[in-house]
């Protein structure tokens, strides 16, 4: 559950992948972090160029990324119960 909290809360502020790094899957964590930062940069540029209309797409896609990452991280931790015991 700590990994999920570390995935969702920083993800809301633009840093997705921290939970993956905490869970020990550094490859997935770095890919999520870099990919999400690139997406955020692209979305901000598109929003500026479209005079704010791009924000209508940015928010739902960002939330979807956070949800997908959290679900896959939850599945990852459930597959390895010996590593992630409370």
Image (cartoon, rainbow, N blue to C red):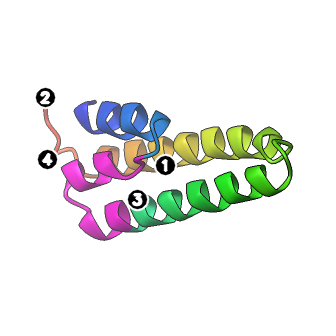
Q: Which numbered disc covers residue 82?
A: 4
Between circles 3 and 2, the one closer to the viewer is 3
Q: Which numbered disc covers residue 86?
A: 2
Q: Residues within 10 Å of mark 4 (few under 14, many from 20)?
A: few
Give the residue number, with chain letter if any, for mark 3: 33
Give the residue number, with chain letter if any, for mark 1: 69
Mark found first going from the N terminus, 2 or 1: 1
Mark found first going from the N terminus, 1 or 3: 3
Question: Which quadrant would the C terminus be assigned to in this image?
Answer: top left
Q: Is residue 15 left or right of residue 77?
A: right
Q: Secondary structure at mark 3?
A: helix
Q: Secondary structure at mark 4?
A: loop
Depicted 53 relative to depicted 17: above or below: above
Q: Where residue 64 sits: x, y (%)?
A: 64, 43
Magenta stretch in the rendered image? 15-30
Mark found first going from the N terminus, 1 or 4: 1
Query: Does the stretch in magenta take in 29?
Result: yes
Between circles 1 and 4, the one closer to the viewer is 1
Q: Are marks 3 and 2 in contact (CB under 8 Å)?
A: no
């Amino acid at each position: 559950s700590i990994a999920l909290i570390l995935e969702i809360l920083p993800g809301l502020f633009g840093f997705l992948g921290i939970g993956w790094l905490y869970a020990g899957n550094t490859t997935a964590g770095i890919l999520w972090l870099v990919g999400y930062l690139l997406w955020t940069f692209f979305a901000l540029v598109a929003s500026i160029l479209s005079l704010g209309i791009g924000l209508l797409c940015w928010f739902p896609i960002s939330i979807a990324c956070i949800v997908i990452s959290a679900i896959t991280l939850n599945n990852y931790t459930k597959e390895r119960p010996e590593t992630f015991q409370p």
